[in-house]
Amino acid sequence: MPSRARPLLYLALLAGLVPVLLPFVWMTLTSIKPLPEVIRVPPQLLPAQPTLQAYVDIFQQFPFGRYLLNSVLVAAMVVSGVLLVSTLGGYAFAKFRFPGRDVLFMVMLASLMVPFQVRMIPLYLMSIRLGLINTLPGVAFPWLFDAFGIFLMRQFMLTLPSELMEAARIDGASEPAIFLRIVVPLVRPALAALGIFTLVVNWEEFLWPLIVTNTDAVRTLPVGLQAFSNQYMSNIHWQMAGAVVAAAPLLIAFLLFQRQFIQGIALTGLKD
Amino acid sequence: MTFYRRQALWGLAFAAPALLLFGVIVAYPLLWAGWLSLQDYSLVGRKVFTGLGNYARLLSDPLFWKSLRNSSVWTVGVVPVVLVISLPLALALNLPLLRLRAAFRTAYFTPVVTNVVAAAFVWRWLFDPQLGPINQVLKLIGIQGPAWLADPRSALPAMMIVAVWKQIGQALVLFLAGLQTIPQEFTEAAQIDGASPGQTFWRVTLPLLNPTLLFVVVILVINALRVFTIPYVMSAGGLQWQTPGGPLDSTRVFVLHIYDVGFVRFQMGYASANAFVLMALIVLLTLIQMKLIQRPFEY
């Protein structure tokens, strides 16, 4: 590239960031404005009298702490469940021979083409029968199996030399011990990528919790935010503070672990 | 018990949680949905077997066609725009000697990890006709902005802008990963042979990037067909509160239609039939992708 074009490139890259980052700036600045400033015409970018009152309000008057806790609990259940089931399953499909193995694996992979919207009605009827409506396990259970997670872990395990496990077997190690002491430590990078990916997707999940919850005690942040904004449509500063609270945990985690997040998404981009 | 038999049992034991969960939360619900789609069932009433009646009903249901149309507009609008923005961006961020590469990548990626409901809240406020900054900026340059979410003509495009904003970072990261698999010798050789940057891109980089491009297109198309949260949240809230999918069903995308039929009107059988149409579209797209990827490359 000619050196004269270089400043132009940087300028273009910076200009492109304005629409990308404007929503974050606007959200944060609006959340620290008092309401009269929020609805002033024409709107001002910077708050004249910045205040954290909106944050105090949403946590004191609304169950925002509860929503946050619910989101964390559901994410913990889903991420740990997916990691456990996918690691065990990936190991079985990569390193063992059993009748029907290849057919079962193909059927699981084919199920990636089944959109959640097909399963959600039976899952809802199932939740009614099992008493899972308005419970946190009810919010989490449809996501515990992830065919993509099994596929990813299997691909990763195929690269591990089988001699490692055979040697341990000859030394008399039990199968669970081989799995826990040899296999799991070697697949940590894949576990991190799958865990991050599952977390990002689950943190956003909106449709299923919207269907399966209708009380504040079990609402996750996304559906809690929506229910709350339907009630207080005109209190924009509250909505923005709520949006900041909902977005902040993952954004902070992302800024701390950028490389892992980006690799996780790039590696698992295969999904969907 | 022989060694091989014991190993087969261990294999099954390790696979058991996956197989069990697959059966309970994937295979069984799928079959159940297929059975439901052949019935008239409204949760409280009795099930009535109607054969293919639900599928026949789709054809004459204006809301089905309307929502399919909205989802098509969404797909045809969002996917090319994301590609046209993210591919040049990836090429720029892949340039050798670019400084602050990681910082730019991080900044452009931020919307991907921003909670979609939070993002929809902010955007519906940015799009507010009177108080939002978008129309204020348009006013400064002498344009009377539309009513955005309050107007059936501009509501869907406004939401599509949000979908573009949210997905550029994802496509960017996938393109960057694809570009890194192309050996630099190829582009350098082209340049030594006197190819212009444009020729290098169209004749060398793009053909080699073909599998990634195809892959990104399919992901974006499937995402577009399954979109729900952005139109739901942006129509059902804020100062221009509408029925989800409003105004006048102009943002009723296909999944919102399925949700409305199933969980607002409780027509579980009919909703299942609608969902199977979505599945047919996704299966078709995935098979086309597999077919195309298997095609040998021409150099």
Image (spheres, rainbow, N blue to C red):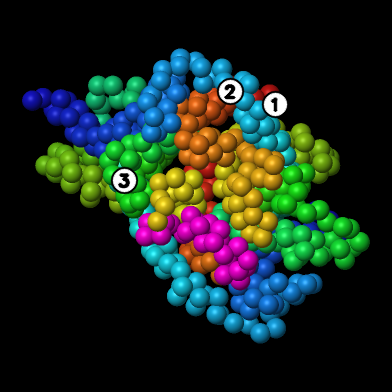
Residue holding disc 1: B299
Mark 3 surroundings within 10 Å by alpha-carbon count, few (fewer than 14), some (14 through 19), many (20 or more): some
Q: Is residue A271 left or right of residue A186?
A: right
In which chain is the residue bearing label 3?
A: A
Picture residue at 70% right of the left edge, 83% below the top:
A48
Residue holding disc 2: B58
| The residue positioned farthest toward the front in the image shown | B45
Measure how far apart labels 1 and 3 are at the Cα level.
56 Å
Q: Which residues are magenta?
A: A216-240
Query: Tag 3's secondary structure?
Result: loop
> Residue A128: which quarter of the image?
top left
Image position, residue A214 (x, y; %): 42, 52
Q: Is residue A260 magenta?
A: no
Q: Amino acid at mark 1?
A: Tyr
Q: B73 or A229: which is nearer to us?
A: A229
Q: Is residue A235 magenta?
A: yes
Image position, residue A29 (x, y; %): 65, 73
Q: B207 or A105: which is nearer to us?
A: A105
